[in-house]
Image (tube, helix red, strand yellow):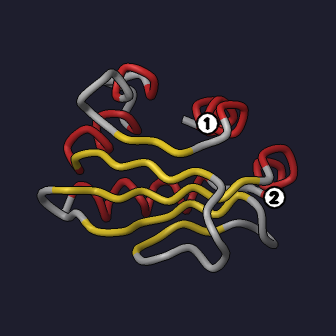
């Protein structure tokens, strides 16, 4: 589905450079189609992304619909637009979230 496809693209885009400059682990709690727990690890080794809990505790946890997540990563929706009241819940370090936006 679109969520799995988006994570495949993200996994392909993760570089050692991003990992070195970001040093953060992002966890996404997605609802709806293809939902569940997904992660992007930009802290360990060469980085990774995929389904399930991250290998270490996440620095940032975002909850949103899977449709919003796919839109966010295909740049139809700027990350911070997704985080308008009511659309999300986020527990995070804002600097890390900004560095995630650079990767998109």
- Residue that carries the numbered disc 1 in the rendered image: 97
Q: Which mark is residue 16?
A: 2
Residue visible at 35% across and 59% down? 29
First-in-chain label (2 vs 1): 2
Residue visible at 84% across and 44% down? 21
Residue visible at 37% across and 20% down? 81
Looking at the picture, tell me which residue is in the foreground, 58 or 14. 58
Disc 2 from disc 1: Cα separation: 18 Å
Q: Secondary structure at mark 1?
A: helix
Tell me where residue 90 appears, x and y as whole percent: 46, 42
Q: Is residue 33 left or right of residue 36?
A: left
In the image, residue 70 sits, relative to residue 80, either above or below, namely below
Looking at the rendering, which quadrant does residue 55 occupy? Answer: bottom right
Which quarter of the image is occupied by the C terminus? Answer: top right
In the image, residue 73 sits, relative to residue 78, either above or below, namely below
Tell me where residue 71 appears, x and y as whole percent: 29, 35
Specify few, some or many for label 1: CA neighbours under 10 Å numbering under 14, 14-19, or 20 or more: some
Tell me where residue 87 appears, x and y as whole percent: 25, 32
């Amino acid at each position: 589905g679109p969520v799995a496809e988006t994570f495949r693209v993200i996994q392909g885009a993760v570089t050692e450079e991003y990992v070195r400059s970001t040093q953060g682990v992002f966890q996404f709690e997605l609802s709806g189609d293809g939902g569940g727990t997904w992660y992007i690890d930009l802290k360990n080794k060469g980085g990774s992304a995929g389904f399930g809990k991250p290998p270490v505790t996440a620095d940032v946890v975002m909850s949103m619909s899977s449709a919003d997540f796919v839109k966010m990563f295909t740049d139809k929706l700027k990350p911070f637009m997704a985080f308008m009241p009511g659309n999300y819940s986020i527990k995070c370090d804002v600097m890390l979230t900004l560095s995630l936006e650079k990767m998109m």
